[in-house]
Amino acid sequence: MAQSNKIVVPAAKAAMEQFKMEAANEVGVTLNKGYNGDLTSRQAGSVGGQMVKKMIENYENSISAK
């Protein structure tokens, strides 16, 4: 199966990996470099949810600073 969540800006790949690792650490999920298919749906959802939460917070901060 082809990967459907491609990074739009390839230069941001390393930063997105770091962001994912930080979000996982904040919710107590241990990620490995590379394959993480052994995560439960709950763990993966926690990481993704934390990433979205932080992105929304960052956006709200950026628009309130204007």
Image (cartoon, rainbow, N blue to C red):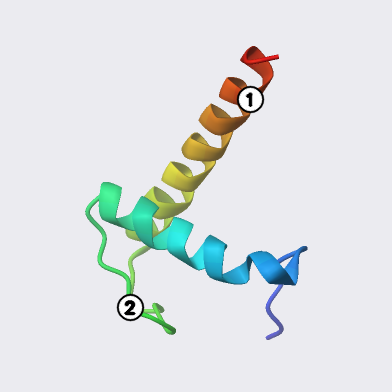
Q: Nearer the viewer, residue 11 or 1?
A: 11
* Mark 2 → mark 1, Cα distance in angstroms: 31 Å
How packed mark 1 is, by other alpha carbons closer than 10 Å (few <14, some 14-19, many 20 or more), is: few
Q: Is residue 17 above or below residue 37?
A: above
Q: Quadrant of residue 50?
A: top left
Residue 5 drawn at (x, y percent): 68, 67
- Is the C terminus in the top left, top right, bottom left or bottom right quadrant? top right
Quarter of the picture containing the N terminus is bottom right
Q: Residue at x 70, y 70 (%)?
A: 11
Residue at the image point whose x is 44% and y is 63% from the top? 18
Q: Answer with left or right where residue 17 lies relative to residue 63.
A: left
Can you tell which of label 2 and label 1 is closer to the viewer? 1
Kind of residue at disc 1: Ser
| Disc ID at residue 53 | none
Q: Residue furthest front?
A: 66
Q: Which residue is mark 2?
A: 32
Name of the residue lying farthest toward the left: 28
Q: Are marks 2 and 1 in contact (CB under 8 Å)?
A: no
Which structural element holds mark 1?
helix
Q: Residue at x 48, y 47 (%)?
A: 51
Q: Earlier in the sequence, mark 2 or mark 1?
A: 2
Question: What's under tag 2, amino acid-wise?
Answer: Asn
Q: What residue did someone put label 1 on?
A: 62
Q: Secondary structure at mark 2?
A: loop
